Amino acid sequence: MANLLYLVHRIPYPPNKGDKIRSFHWLKHFSANHRVFLGAFVDCPEDWQYAKGLSQRTEEVCLRPFSVRSQVWRSIVGLLRGQPLTQACYADAQLTAWCRRLVEGGKIDLVFVFSSAMAQFVDPRWQLPKIIDFVDVDSDKWRQYAAKKPFFSRWIYRREGEKLLRYDRAVAQEFDLCLFVSPAEAELFKELAPEVAGRVDFVENGVDTAYFNPEHEFVSPYRPEEEALVFTGAMDYWANVDAVRWFADQVFPKVLQYRVEARFYIVGARPRPEVKALERREGIIVTGAVPDVRPYLAHARLAVAPLRIARGIQNKVLEALAMGKSVLATSMAMDGLEMPSGLDIQVADGVHEVADLVVQALREPSFLPRYSPRNREFIEMRYSWNRHLKRLDAILNAL
C-alpha cells in the first residue's frame, strides 16, 4: 500500500460528467489499495457539500476554489506570460505549498496527476514515480474549436491549441508514464510528441453496468405518444452546445416533417442561454439538471450523439449502449470507441443522412430497435470498469 498524491483539476465527485466519471473511478480504485492524498479544485459551488464524503476515502484533502473571477484574472496573467490558459487558470500558491509539504515531508511514494493543468504542482526534481493521465489530446480539441469559432475569437483558440501542445510535450518528458483514454488518443499524442512515444499508454473509460442497467424499473418521463430522441450531457460544455444546436437547427426540423410525434430531449445540467432558447421551438424540450438520467435513456426511442467536436471516449454513448439503447451518432462521437459490426448503431455526419436515419428508425422498429440486447451485451463484455481497472493496475505495477 503506497501513499499516493492524487491531483485532479475538478473535484472527482459526483461522477456526473465525462472527466469526473473517470477521475472518480480512479479515486475509488486508488482508495481501496492505497492511502490517498487528494488535491483538487471546486468549480461548482454546490460541489463543496461533497468535501466531507471525500475525506472518508482519503488521508488528507486540499480543495481549492475555482471561480470565474479568478479564471479571468489568471487568464490575463497567462496571456502576458505567454502561457497556455489551461495552465494559467489553475495556478494556485496554496495547492503548490500543500503538495510541497507532503512530498518534502516524506509522506508521498507515488504521484498521479489527472489532466495536464495539474502538472504544474509537481516539481520535476521529486525523486518519485510520476504518472499523468492526460485523458484526451486537449490541444487538438482547441484546434477544432478554432475552426468553428468567429474570426474575432478564433485566434485565442488557435493560440491555446499551439501553446497547450508545447506545454503538454514538455510535461510528458517529466513524467514516467503518460496515459490517455483510448488507443487513438495515445497514437495521436505519439505522432505529435514522438520524443515521449515510449512512455505513452492508454486506459479506456468504462461504464458502471450495475447502475446503467435496463433491468431496473424506471417511470417514463415522456408522454405515451412521444417518440423521444434523447441527448445527454453537461450543457455548459461547448462541444455539447454545438451538437444540440446543430441537431436542432439542421436535422430535427426535417424529422418533424415526417414524424410529428418526434421530440428532441436535451437532458443535462447547466444549459447555456443558447440551449435554453431551443425549448421555444416545436418539439424540443430542455430539461436542465435531472436527478437521474437513466429514465430518459430507458424510455427513449433513440439516443443521439451528434457531436461535431470531440476527443477521446464519449461516456454518453457508453451509457446509452449499457442501457440497451440504439444509438445514432456522428463519426466524431464514435471516434474513440472500438465497435464491431452488428450492433444497433448508425454513424452519419451529413444533415440529410442523419435526418433520414432518424426517420427510418422511427418508421421501422426493427431498423434501430427501442431495446438492443446486443448493445448491452457488448458493453458488459468490452467496456466494464473492472476490465479497465485491471489494465491500470498492470501498467502501474510495471513501473
Image: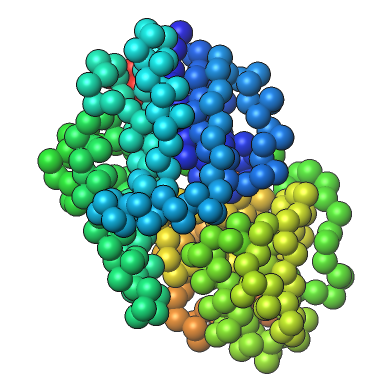
The quarter of the image holding the N terminus is: top left
Residue 305 falls left or right of residue 311: right
User: Is residue 29 in view?
Assistant: no
Q: Residue furthest bottom?
A: 257
Q: Residue at x 45, y 22 (%)?
A: 98
Decide which of 253, 107 is in the foreground and name it: 107
* Location of residue 287 by image quarter: bottom right
Q: Residue furthest left?
A: 195
Decide which of 40, 306 is in the foreground and name it: 40
Indicate whether 247 appears above or below 145: below
Indicate whether 381 appears above or below 6: below
Indicate whether 177 appears above or below 221: above
- What is the number of callouts on the image? 0
User: Is residue 320 in view?
Assistant: yes
> What is the x, y in percent for residue 77?
35, 52
> What is the x, y in percent for residue 183?
32, 45
Scheme of colours in the image? rainbow
Q: Residue at x 37, y 7 (%)?
A: 106
Q: Residue at x 56, y 48 (%)?
A: 67
> What is the x, y in percent for residue 196?
17, 38
* Location of residue 105 by image quarter: top left
Indicate whether 151 appears above or below 110: below
> What is the x, y in percent for residue 53?
68, 26
Q: Residue at x 68, y 33 (%)?
A: 50
Residue 174 falls left or right of residue 373: left
The quarter of the image holding the C terminus is: top left
